[in-house]
């Protein structure tokens, strides 16, 4: 099942169910928003499944990706992990941080009151802040009781999403060194068109990890095509980490951190900073600049059959 | 004007206006929740002021503090500063962190989907996590455009609140050292009974700082009575820091961090960890233990005339 949210007069938009070919969409009478459905998931699923069958059968209206908001345009909580080991090692080089290794999944709390639309102009105040994208995956969970362990956590994962975690690298290192973590370095993220149920991914959802290739294009040029599988911790473990000392509200979004593979020289990267880390290793200094106003990043996660379950994300940096 | 929120079937509760003696309350027809009023503040104020006059004139029903939720039971964003210099210096000793000084207000993003009621049992999973309270002040802002500077930021401060920022000290140091900041170390906060407009504080609101004494009692014994005035950065500067690279949604809550005074040996502390820091300085080792299940913390901010604009906060640690 694939869900999307139409832009509307409300900040939460209007929930729609999407056809398998992503060409049509159908609203669901009693479930106006994704948040309302997530908060009463068991009650909502029959109506959502019925709408999915109807739209697959030809019901509904044409879907225009440009009319879509993020599947969840705002959430009560956004927690982002960093669990691709090859990414973490390169980032420490870029940021000049010598971190001790930890035996838990790194995770920070980010701004959740806005997720940018899949196709959007994203305002930034200053090119000098080191504007960067970060391609990653995320899950949207039901209410997760405090203290839920990893073995039980997978059952709370309702939807999977594809995220662009905008980052301002000039601010990132100093904020990390302060011990208080990122704040100014992490403006709101964007989400690709569709949120999908785990069953929709079939064999591409393994051990709570997405076996999908995240293609990243920067100004029309292929920048990365890393696979989402090699997470050091699965999303079940990320959910459990997040819920250790707090109950997670229904609709909490939890991210994987930037997708990265050990074969980064072959597959490329999902953020500019990581490529700069590779350049530091290989050439002694970073060479690739960060984004400029007008630059476009496009991301699309693909199955081994070439399907794009989340649709596209295509965002343009504009001057605020 | 003092506002409160009654517990109700909804997570957002029911907004009420409170009489000057805090004995009575009155709902406001068109503004069911504080979030709804904050999102349309200019439109809401006339109705709120009319209700305030009516309740002052004897209208309304008796107010029972035990029936209150937090004034804002959940918010789209919670950003907490740390701007009392005497607190920061002691905490670095407690946590064994050698931080370089920074020329900005330290601030982290915390969990905002829950603010505990003023009188509440607060569930924690484990006494070994170093359960601690942190008494502080906060503001609730209107929508603040990205890039708003400090000089313009005060105009967006709509309400002032009193907060207990629950902290788990055993987890705090390792999370700081990771560079990703606090997550498990910071479960949801509590709020005292009332949110007040700046004019309600009169001369006790100076330079966007609260000239109020925050009394803190732990299990019935006075633990601290520090004054809120000596913030190194005022709330206007905190709002501007928060808004540098993001627009703040209406209803964003921004905190001061633990209230602390340089005369901590005379006035006491607003959290246990700070007292432990003093003990490390004075005696070579911490002596005061953290909280146990069943412990009660009570906080009340007082004006120089002995008034308590925010009412009380009285929370009990219970086993989850």
Image (cartoon, coloured by chain):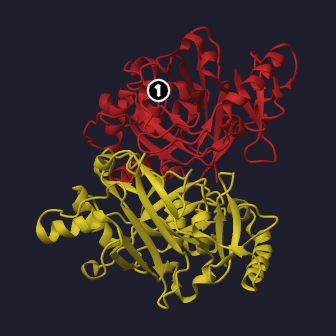
Chain colours: A yellow, B red
Q: Is residue A170 above or below residue A288?
A: above
Q: Which residue is mark 1?
A: B152
Of B22 and A159, nearer the camera is: A159
State the residue at coordinates (80%, 73%): A47
* Quadrant for the N terminus of chain A in the image: bottom right
Helix, strand or loop at label 1? It is: helix
- Name the chain under label 1: B
Q: How many marks?
A: 1
Picture coordinates of residue B183, whole percent (x, y): 47, 53
Q: Is residue B263 above or below residue A222?
A: above
Q: Is residue B156 above or below residue A236?
A: above
- In the rendered image, is residue A71 in sight? no
Of B30 and A79, nearer the camera is: B30
Residue furthest top in the image: B305
- In the rendered image, is residue B307 in sight? yes
Picture coordinates of residue B146, whole percent (x, y): 46, 40
Of A170 and B82, nearer the camera is: A170
Q: Quadrant of residue B1?
A: top right
Q: Is residue B282 above or below residue A205?
A: above
> Badge 1 local density, few (<14 within 10 Å), some, or many (20+)?
few
State the residue at coordinates (87%, 23%): B60
Residue furthest bottom in the image: A305
> In this image, B315 relative to B171: left or right?
right
Picture coordinates of residue B203, whole percent (x, y): 55, 10
Residue furthest left in the image: A284
* Quadrant for the C terminus of chain A in the image: top left
> In this image, B55 relative to B113: left or right?
right
Picture coordinates of residue A113, whole percent (x, y): 57, 50
> In this image, A55 relative to A195: left or right?
right
């Amino acid at each position: 099942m694939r869900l999307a949210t139409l832009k509307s007069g409300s900040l939460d938009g209007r929930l729609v169910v999407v056809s398998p070919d992503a060409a049509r969409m159908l609203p669901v009478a009693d479930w106006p928003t994704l948040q309302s459905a997530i908060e009463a998931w068991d009650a909502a699923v029959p109506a959502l499944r019925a709408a999915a069958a109807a739209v697959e059968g030809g019901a509904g209206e044409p879907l225009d990706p440009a009319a879509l908001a993020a599947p969840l345009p705002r959430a009560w909580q956004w927690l982002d992990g960093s669990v691709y080991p090859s990414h973490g090692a390169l980032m420490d080089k870029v940021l000049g941080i010598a971190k001790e290794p930890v035996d838990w999944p790194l995770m920070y709390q980010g701004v959740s009151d806005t997720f940018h639309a899949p196709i959007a102009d994203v305002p930034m105040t200053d090119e000098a802040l080191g504007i960067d994208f970060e391609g990653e995956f995320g899950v949207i969970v039901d209410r997760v009781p405090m203290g839920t362990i990893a073995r039980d956590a997978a059952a709370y994962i309702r939807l999977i999403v594809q995220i662009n975690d905008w980052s301002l690298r000039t601010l990132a290192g100093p904020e990390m060194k302060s011990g208080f973590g990122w704040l100014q370095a992490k403006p709101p993220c964007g989400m690709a068109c569709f949120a999908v149920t785990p069953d929709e991914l079939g064999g591409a959802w393994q051990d709570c990890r997405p076996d999908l290739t995240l293609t990243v294009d920067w100004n029309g040029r292929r920048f990365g095509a890393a696979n989402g599988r090699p997470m050091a911790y699965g999303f079940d473990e990320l959910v459990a980490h997040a819920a250790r000392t707090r109950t997670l509200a229904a609709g909490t979004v939890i991210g994987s951190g930037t997708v990265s593979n050990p074969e980064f020289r072959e597959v490329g990267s999902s953020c500019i900073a990581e490529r700069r880390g590779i350049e530091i290793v290989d050439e002694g200094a970073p060479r690739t600049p960060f984004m400029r106003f007008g630059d476009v990043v496009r991301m699309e996660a693909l199955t081994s059959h070439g399907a794009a379950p989340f649709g596209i994300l295509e965002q343009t940096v504009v001057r605020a």
